[in-house]
Amino acid sequence: MFGGSMVALVTPMHGDGSLDLDALGRLVEFHVEAGTDAIIVSGTTGESPCLTTVELDALVRAAVEAAAGRITIIGGSGSNSTARALELTAVVREAGAAAALVVTPYYNKPTQQGLYLHYEAVARGGGLPVILYNVPGRTACDLLPETVARLAEVPGVVAIKEAVPGTERVRRFRELMGERLSLLSGDDATAMAFLLAGGDGVISVTANVAPRLMHGLCEAARHGEPRKAEALNDRLEGLHRALFVEPNPIPVKWAVMQMGLIHSGIRLPLTALEDRHHDEVRAAMARAGVEYSS
């Protein structure tokens, strides 16, 4: 089962956009020391649409090597082509990932039956545990709870990252399938409420910047300590907002760069964070107690 504070890791790049595997090793160490429960390589925050298959393989291999068994490494292997998703899942499996995060097929707008068959094919043929990833705000399709309940019966489907804000769905999931899947929030701003409503963890953007606080929040919420969870979330609320002042991962890559952990590289069509947002992100980092360069 997957749970706790799971970071949707940024992909470190040099100024020219090439991969920086040395920085990736530093990030893995940073998260091991901070208590992060798992690292997701090449998710949305990792700029997965802009990575080649060779780069995906290199990133997962480097993360697995740096982790040395101390933290779970999960590889993003989603596509809007089922055949391509199977291919990418094989890549992250061979590179040593413990599971695959598979986003719903974007742009195509498949039916619920199409989504079911897509995930069934990846789960049965990919050779790795599959985490479903539903993010309708980016993909233009919505994996409904009733379809998730059907997929919970498919061997190999182990969890869902649900990026629909709020708690309504976590309750519906539990009604339909009990504890058969791990329920992971994909929305930092409502993750605390999701956890208190019965969720198992969060795949977090904010954890890139404040991993100890996110880990503490998850632990408090999962152990029935709402006041402690709320106190930690109060310190993180500014980051939950500021890291989305421009489309993810633009603000979070800038913040992690300010922490001295990565260089400035980001790939088109994404661009560097606009100057007008710098003070807001810095203020949120300061409120969370995150050190940064001035």
Image (cartoon, rainbow, N blue to C red):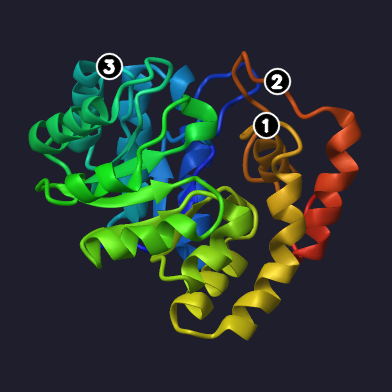
What residue sits 77% from the left and 29% below the top?
273
**Residues at circles 1 and 2 in contact by the CB criterion of under 8 Å:** yes
**Residues at circles 3 and 2 in contact by the CB criterion of under 8 Å:** no
Which residue position is annotated with label 3? 81
3D distance between C-alphas at marks 1 and 2 = 7 Å
Q: In this view, does 111 lie to the left or right of 139?
A: left
Which residue position is annotated with label 1? 250
**Mark 3: which secondary structure?**
loop
Which residue position is annotated with label 2? 271
Which one is earlier in the sequence, the residue at label 3 or at label 2?
3
**Mark 1: which secondary structure?**
helix
Residue 21 is tagged as none
Where does residue 253 sit, x and y in percent of width and height?
65, 37
**Mark 2: which secondary structure?**
loop
283 is higher (above) or lower (below) than 19:
below
> What is the tally of numbered marks visible in this picture?
3
What residue sits 69% from the left and 53% below the top?
240
